Image (tube, rainbow, N blue to C red):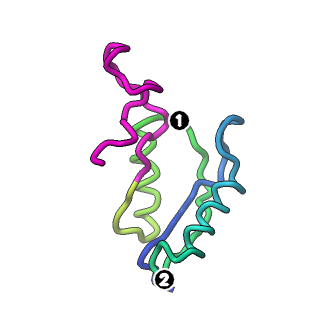
Amino acid sequence: KKPLLWLTPLGGWTKSDDMPLDVRINQHKVVIEEGMLPADTVMAIWPSPMIYAGPTEVQWHCKSRRNVGARFFITGRDPAGIKRSKAPGQMTPGGDFYDGNHGG
């Protein structure tokens, strides 16, 4: 099958306080089943671990998927929990690098 959209959630090692794989997979399944994505969407667990290395890790995940045929790559808003290097009063409430409402 030649998918228009290929979802590849990580299935390798993650920290104990991360969202469990079965929960992440079920979230993706519901989004697909509810018709929120194109009919030719394919989901496949990516066996790589989450190393929590920030932008370097984002590049690793992109390149590894490109090596097996992905043409474009979209990453989440907060790769590996990168924190903003601003004064505490200027940070988002949780201190995250990106504001969840950015662009909205």
Q: Residue furthest bottom?
A: 1
Question: At which x and y percent is residue 50?
Answer: 58, 43
Residue under the point 46% across and 68% down = 68
Q: Is residue 67 positioned above or below 2 on the image?
A: above
Figure label count = 2
- What residue is pinned by disc 1? 52
- What residue is pinned by disc 2? 40
Which class describes the residues within 10 Å of circle 1: few (<14), some (14-19), or many (20+)?
A: some
Secondary structure beneath disc 1?
Answer: loop
Nearest the viewer among 72 and 27 is 27
Residue under the point 38% across and 57% down = 74
Whether the magenta-drawn stretch holds residue 71 is answered as: no
Question: At which x and y percent is residue 36?
Answer: 48, 72
State which quadrant residue 30 falls in.
bottom right
Question: At which x and y percent is residue 61?
Answer: 46, 52
Question: At which x and y percent is residue 73?
Answer: 37, 60
In the image, what residue type sits under mark 2?
Asp
Nearest the viewer among 7 and 52 is 7
Which class describes the residues within 10 Å of circle 2: few (<14), some (14-19), or many (20+)?
A: few
In the image, what residue type sits under mark 1?
Tyr
Residue under the point 48% across and 82% down = 40
Q: Which mark is residue 28?
A: none
In this rendering, position of residue 47 left or right of residue 83: right
Circles 2 and 1, Cβ within 8 Å, touching? The answer is no
C-alpha gap between disc 2 and disc 1: 31 Å
**What is the span of residues highlighted in magenta in the rendered image?**
75-104
Secondary structure beneath disc 2?
Answer: loop
Instruction: Tell me the mark number nearer the camera, choosing from 2 and 1.
Output: 2
Residue under the point 46% across and 61% down = 65
